[in-house]
Image (cartoon, rainbow, N blue to C red):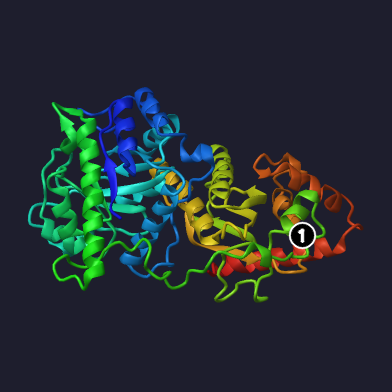
Amino acid sequence: MTRVKICGCMRVADAVAAAEAGADFIGIIFAESRRRVSPEEAALIARTVGAPLRELEQDEPPPLHPGRFETIEAWFAHGAEALDRLLARKRPLVVGVFADQPAEEINEIADEVGLDLVQLSGSEPWSDCLAANRQAIKVLPPRAGMTAGEIMAHIEPETALAFMLDPSRGTGTAGDRGVAAAVAARVPLWLAGGLDAANVAATIASVRPWAVDVSSGVETDGAKDARKIASFVAAVRDADSALRTRTKRGPRTDLGPRTDRSSDLSPPRGTTKPSDPSSRGTDGSSDLSPRGSRMASRISEPRRSSPRLVGFPHRGGHRYHLVFSTNDNRPHLRQSWAALAVSELHGVAAATGFTLEAYCVMPDHVHVLVAGDGALDSSLTAFSHRFKQALGYRFKRATGKPLWHRSYYDHVVRTGEPVLSHVAYIVANPVVAGLVDAPEDWPHSGPQEALEEVAGALGDRSEDLSVRSHAEALAREFGDHLAGHRQ
């Protein structure tokens, strides 16, 4: 099925018409354009089609899994699958359109309006998609004469969720459909430019895009026309029906290769199926408080016993002790940057399906204990890279310096391993370093439950020798990591 985006909605009536016609996405423009609306107006338009995904607690994190996908094709197929999951929860989704605007402005508007996705349509680098707090669609306006190969060379995977070709920049100009078809043969392509109800069926037949984007093609005298919107969506659905009929009759010889990979691609190598909640066990965390005990029922046993598990999926219901070191171990994480790191930890954990059980932000490194959820298929790579990218990008823009060392350390908490030792080691870091006298004095440690859990064990040295001895072993292991900066 070809998805439809009605872009440039300026009134509540435009959104109503798009939703009633069966559009999959509506676009609201915040870039320089005659269709630009204020955030206040946009909020009214967005609410017309339902509460934002974030209020429904159904938004997914960007698919930031560097190294998990071996090809550009697999990356964007994964993005198409993610979008279809979101569409199954809400339709139409609200897309905010921006161009060459600061990430802070984009994120502020996205939160104020209640956007579901953002679209970056300017000359900004692909890496700007990582700074957005919504999943992103990146637009490339191809230059005249660009080949499909040249366009593909401009694509940077592992950043945007989806990729759009728009030669018109909102002017309604159609581009080279042959080149678009060649690109669509490789990736699930969003196509804009010069589309209307009269030509969209032929375009779908020749290009086979994953989605089509229309704005001026459904307007009369510069305003959205409800009848044209309905006609456009109907023409798209008729074109899809015709393609399905031709496919059933026999091999296709005139339509070009199929490009909709959102439902029929096998999972890329290295991915795993979501964990079966009924198969999850415990991790022997009897030393946790009732809060931790409740989490224990969601944790399954790692398949191997090495602290650095080769071939371990790092997905599903497992606990991890993570350490992120700053570049050259410089004390970058002070004052406001430390507070921002704590805020990002909470936000990224919630977005990627993890419970944040303990953390400590030191000037030159960050310790985190997180617990995944098997039912959510929580991905450690998604958590780690999103945290590093979100904070690192802000730091680089503010200071011009890289924040992080290229690697990070992770320890899978195994069955029978005392979880309290990890909590104690993490929150006691500032005390060991001589920065404060007690863990609760350090402003960038927590959560409060973790500090309360270890207070007794740290205060009474005769109470739990296993906790202290294991914490010492963790300190040696982390020391080895710092010395060798091993992956």
Residue 209 visible? The answer is no
Q: Where is residue 472? Give x, y as percent.
A: 76, 64
* Label 1 CA crowd tier, 10 Å (few <14, some 14–19, many 20+): many
- Mark 1, secondary structure of its residue: helix
- Asked if residue 397 lies left or right of residue 145, the reply is right
Residue 250 higher or lower than 162, as above or below: below
**x and y percentages locating residue 149 in the rendered image:** 17, 65
Tell me if 214 is positioned left or right of 40 in this view.
left
Q: Position of residue 354 (x, y in %)?
A: 60, 53
Q: Nearer the viewer, residue 386 or 393?
A: 386
Left or right of 232? Residue 410 is right
> What residue is drawn where x is 81% and y is 61%?
468
Say which residue appears at 21% left-offset and 42% top-offset: 232
Residue 470 in view? yes
Split into 4 quadrants, where in the image is the N terminus?
bottom left
Residue 204 placement: quadrant = bottom left
The residue nearer to you, when weighing 379 against 412, is 379
From the top left corner, tell me how far across and down residue 186 is, in percent. 25, 65
Residue closest to the far left: 145
Three-letter amino acid code of the residue under disc 1: Ser
Question: Going 24% across and 67% down the picture, which residue do you hit?
Answer: 247
- Residue matched to label 1: 421
**Which is nearer the eye, 394 or 240?**
240
